[in-house]
Every structure is written in C-alpha cells, then in structure tokens.
Amino acid sequence: MEEFKSKLNNEVYTEKYKKAKDYLFKLFTDKNQEGVEELYSKIREVANVAGVSGEFLIKQIKNFFELENSEEFVKSTFEILKKLIDQTIEHPEIFEKIRRERVIQEKGNIKLSELMYYSLDLENGTLIIHVAPKGELKLGEIIKAFRGGLKELAKQVKEDERIKDIQATSWIVAKNPGLLEKAGFEVKGSISEEMKAEYFGDEEKPVSWAHISREALLEKYL
C-alpha cells in the first residue's frame, strides 16, 4: 500500500511539473502580456499563502524574459516556481479555495456561497448561475453550498423585477442532474463545444445547463 501511495504521489508531481513547464513554454513563445500578468497574479496568491515574497520572485522572472531561447526560460523560471508548485500539491484544499475566490471575484460576478456565483444578462431578463471548481470539497459540503446559494439567490431575485429566468451552467449540472431536478430546475443538456471553449476554457469536465423560472424559484426558496 505504501509503495502504491508513493507511486501515486510521484505521478501527481510529474504531471504538475509537466503542465507547469508546458504553460511556461507557451507563455514565452506567445509573448502575450495578458498571460504574463495572469502568471504574476497567480504567483502573488500562492506566495502570500506560502509566506514568501511574490514580488521578489516576479522580479527574477521578469529578467528571464530577456533570455534568448525558450528552454533557458522554462528551466530558469521553473526552478524559481518549483517550491510554490509543491505547496499547491501538498495543500490542495487551501489553493483550491483561492482559485474559487479568484473565479468568483471576476468582473461582473456576484457571490452567493463558497461555490456559487452568478452573472446577469438583463437585456434578456436572464440570470446565469455558475459553480466554481469544487477542489477537495466533499459532496455534503457541495450540496450545502448549493442549497444555501439558492436561498440567497431567491432573496436577490425578489428585489429585481427585471430577472425573469434563471439558468444554471456548470460542471455540477452535468455530473449531478438529479440534484438540479430536486432543486426545481429543468435540465436541458450539454452546452455546445463552442460555448464551452469561450466561457469554460479551463474546465475539463462536461458542462451542461438547466433553468428555472423566476416564479418557481421564489415559490420554492422564499
């Protein structure tokens, strides 16, 4: 058993390291400034939890962009970031929570619970619920966050007469359609690949959508 756990752990590290190096290689070759700033933002988040200076690491990495080839850049930058990557592997629950908060706090999103947030399309009278990555949360914790989020949502929808229809678009609709049906939603099925690529580029799981009317939501949760 111990040998199996050791092998599994090694595979996790190997996979994470490969993803990090692939990410850095693409960053260097694309020279995309938005991508670079996103890297710096991630470094600040992880470094803050790890108790190291993110700005010091970023200063070093900025110098590496002056290197002549991608191999040198990836090797040098990876060595700087390796300890932070190890922290995310060894304490996944902390960094998954950070990731959820970052997703939820994106411009225009409104938080409902630890997992749930929404955006508005008032031109069409639609509110769209999203569910952030669950990370290490157990099923019971997910259900609690989901139900609590719907109760909070009902309070907010009641105050805004412009909202006529509520949609839920996330991995949880695809994985647990029964949970949505019990919650009063009508499950409609998978979203298109084009929509997934545009709005859920980082999501590896299937994404589906469901909806519930304003009246049905308020009747069930108020």
Image: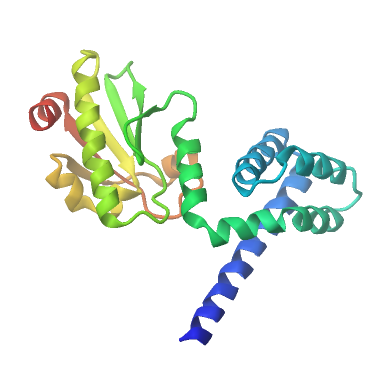
Residue nearer the viewer, 125 or 151 = 151
Is residue 164 visible in the rendered image? The answer is no
Q: Specify the quadrant of the image occupied by residue 34.
A: top right
Residue nearer the viewer, 22 or 198 = 22
What is the count of numbered marks?
Answer: 0
Q: Residue at x 33, y 16 (%)?
A: 123
Q: Residue at x 83, y 55 (%)?
A: 76
Is residue 65 visible in the rendered image? The answer is yes
Which residue lies most toward the front here?
A: 51
Quadrant containing the N terminus is bottom left
User: What colour scheme does the image use?
Assistant: rainbow
Q: Establish if 150 lies above or below 30.
A: above
x, y (%) of residue 31?
77, 40
Quadrant containing the C terminus is top left
On the rendered structure, is 214 left or right of 88? left
x, y (%) of residue 122?
32, 17
x, y (%) of residue 81?
72, 53
Q: Residue at x 64, y 56 (%)?
A: 85
